[in-house]
Amino acid sequence: MGTRTHRNHENSIFDLFRICPSAGAVCVCLLSLTIVIPATVAADAPRPSPLGSNPLIDGRLNPPLGSPTALPDQPGFSFSIDELFFPPGVSHVVIVDIDALRRSLFYSMLSRNALPNIRRITGRVTYSAGQFEEGEAAFFDSVGVNRCESEFPAVTFPNHATIFTGVHAKTHGIVGNEFFDRFGVTSGRGPRYYAFTAGQTLALDDVVSVYDLPASEPGGLANRLLRVSTVYENAALLGLRSAVVHSQYSSRDHAFIPEIDWLTPEVLVLLEFGIEEFFNTGLGPFDTAMVNRAIQYLQGGNRPDILTLYFFGLDQTGHIQGIAAQELYLRTVIDVQLGRLFFGDDHFPGLDKLQGWNFEETVFIFTGDHGMVEVRSEDQFVVSVAEQQNSFEGINQEYQTLLESRGYTVFGFPEIESESDIVVGQNEGMSHIYVRRGARDPTNWESWSDRPDFTSDILPVANILRRANLGLPQPGEMENAFDLILARDPSGPKGWESAHQVLQEDGTLADVGDLLGQDPLNQYVNPAARLDNLRSMFSGDIFVIANWDEGYHLGVGASGDHGSMRPEDSQVPLIIARPGNRTGALAGRTISRASLADVTPTVGALLRFPTPQAEGTSLVNPIRPCFTTALQMSSGRQINVPRLRRIRDGIAHKGLGIGLMRCYYRQ
């Protein structure tokens, strides 16, 4: 556990010219330009600093911001690719990721100046309260999003994956805190149930494996399940360095990317966290240890281009003490700790005075993964499914009791998937329910990877839940517990990516857009699109959404919870601020709506590297792609060209080939 020490890549020097007179060089033609790459590169060439300049090309052309600049065609003209294609003036991006950061709470506290250290970064924010999280925010010194949508379900692991990859859950593959890989794609050893948060299944192995423990899970379990690159991997292609402090995601192949420093919690901190959570003593020490870790890293002389800080304690405070307790935690723990990091204390000068850190060219991004809603902690408001062999008094087994009384075998825990015909993945505000083909008949069970029949396998299970929710055949603990039940038919042409339909109280099916799109109370946030973003081979055949209005939730007892499509837990804050320079494109702009998938491309635009996998859109100075073919040649070995990686695919190429090069220009 701890910081990994890495070497730097070798680097090369390059220039841009209209023509290519140089002998002994490889020429790659791009539109009307020719990029000249020396055929031989010094192995020990220093890595160019993102703060520094290239004397060969800087200062030749500075196109006005906002113009889709055409490439010059004057003979012999050379220019700065930095100035032409990318927004200048940003050297570092600091991402402050606060778990369970409620939009209304954060914006209202900023408007009241109740978070003085954060307010020094964001500048003036106003917020007018409203029902159902419909209050309006306005930003005067930064770029702020009034309503930023999380992924559904609104829980930690899929949303952090979206923040740090720029893609939705159906693309990155993390569809919940708890979910089932019925194909064994991720494990390579057959069907596998994942429980990153342990919950009622007590799957503690998955929890510790997220942070690179045990040694049999190198690189972190959540990292290894990602199906696309992270923003840190994108940055590393340019030679930019990232430090990720206590966050669950760094890269798919972390051990092989020297530009990424993943600072995981120390073993003793994890043990302390477990004790604090168990005895409800709060997680202030866990978040304080995170900031201490970041300060220690910076005091060691490290100056990353991207610094990510993950605060976990606000989420657990809301779960344990209720959402009313979150304001105190934000004010007395998170704001205080960020003040130490940003503005210093007796032992650290702060980022604003840190030698080698350009505070004026630092952009700060504040966001969270989901919100939270108040729920009832009493036993009768909790719908659970417990692990059979280790179930204990105090945990209900409503799913198990109901479905096994109808002849099913229910479970959701590693090592017993092959003995079950229903697996339930609890995600607090929703459940993934997976149904096996041939359910209820062990003599006729087929592989989990076979598509279940909608009429004979999936719909009967959905109808059992529907009737229990209506109190039929007799009232029970699941009566009125569900707000929505949705089911998909995987036998259609879209297979596992088929759309889920709403199972109505009368047993008929309705299209999500037709039914929920006419919701006059705006009870759900963008339901059709967010459900579409969850369509996946890893998502459940049935979705069950908790009845927040009555205080029900799905999992274990808590005072605050999240995971649904309601505004309270589906909308999060998002602010982009440059306190050292409150002018230009990064000041005084309010964006009505955005998505957490927009964070990664925004970071890429700020630091001038492409994020080709991203499904979101940059919120500042968007970089737009254009395409051209290019002849890629080298002397038969790897050529490392960090600056040229800003125009991406194929320049650092091994061997000879023709490929598609992506270039970028600034809007």
Image (cartoon, grey):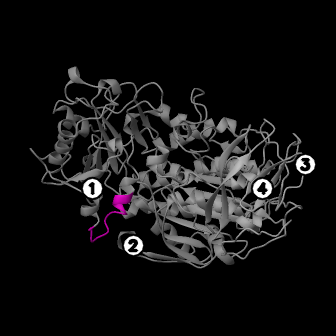
Name the residue carrying label 4: 347
Residue 489 position in % (x across, y down):
26, 44
Against 151, residue 124 (above or below) is below
Q: CA distance from mark 4 to mark 2?
A: 42 Å
Name the residue carrying label 1: 547
Q: Nearer the viewer, residue 57 or 425?
A: 57
Instruction: Give the magenta range.
Output: 518-529
Q: CA distance from mark 4 to mark 3?
A: 55 Å
Q: CA distance from mark 2 to mark 3?
A: 64 Å
Name the residue carrying label 2: 134
Task: Specify the amino acid type for callout 1.
Answer: Asn
Residue at 47% over, 47% down: 171
Horizontal side, residue 24 vs residue 95: left or right: right
Q: Are marks 4 and 3 in contact (CB under 8 Å)?
A: no
Residue at 35% over, 73% down: 131
Task: Specify the amino acid type for callout 4.
Answer: His
Name the residue carrying label 3: 23
Residue 338 position in % (x across, y down):
65, 60
User: Does label 2 or label 1 sit earlier along the sequence?
Assistant: 2
Instruction: Between label 4 and label 1, give the one nearer the viewer.
Output: 1
Q: CA distance from mark 4 to mark 1?
A: 49 Å
Horizontal side, residue 314 vs residue 465: left or right: right
Instruction: Between label 4 and label 3, give the one nearer the viewer.
Output: 3
